[in-house]
Image (cartoon, helix red, strand yellow):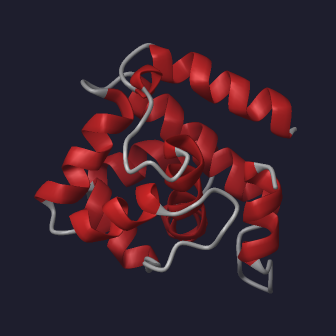
Amino acid sequence: MSFLNAITAFAGGGAGQPSPTEHTSAVQALLQHFSGQPGGLGGMVDQFHQNGMGQHVDNWMSSQPGSQPSQQIAPQQVEQGLGGSAVESIAQRAGLSPEMTKMALATALPLLMSHLSGGSGQLPAQAGGSGLSSLAEGLFSRAL
């Protein structure tokens, strides 16, 4: 199951919930945001650990791609893990409200981390710094 198909399957898409397009926009904005940050997605993982959310991200990276990770996250926990300024930046890049961004990322982050780690518990070397842009480009060029 491709990453975006997994998001669509697990997202539900009910009234007031992000659409598949909004999920995609939020994830692309997240990847763009962290490609410019020290450590790339590894830096994001470190933020989750520092903000008391490490058990969630560790579970996601140990889950098999295409399956729903057992540790889910609420929209408020997205902000706790990423920090308010990161959520604002990601929302602005995605063209979404911060609330919609947090809802989209609450669904997409577990699936993204599972997909990128391949269930190994580790991110690939290219998930740091400038390699994140090419990783994101490859992920979304196949998915869209």
Q: Nearer the viewer, residue 133 or 89?
A: 133
Q: Nearer the viewer, residue 93 or 55?
A: 55
Q: Is residue 143 above or below residue 85?
A: above
For the N terminus, give its image quadrant: bottom right
Q: In this view, does 132 lie above or below 99?
A: above
Q: Is 3 left or right of 44, judged from the image as shown?
A: right
For the C terminus, give its image quadrant: top right
What is the x, y in percent for residue 49? 18, 57
Confirm whether residue 95 shows in the render.
no
Q: Is residue 25 above or below residue 124?
A: below
Q: In this view, does 70 lie above or below 127?
A: below
Q: Residue furthest front?
A: 120
What is the x, y in percent for residue 50? 12, 56
What is the x, y in percent for residue 81? 28, 62
Q: Residue furthest left?
A: 50
Q: Is 69 left or right of 86, judged from the image as shown?
A: right
Confirm whether residue 108 shows in the render.
yes
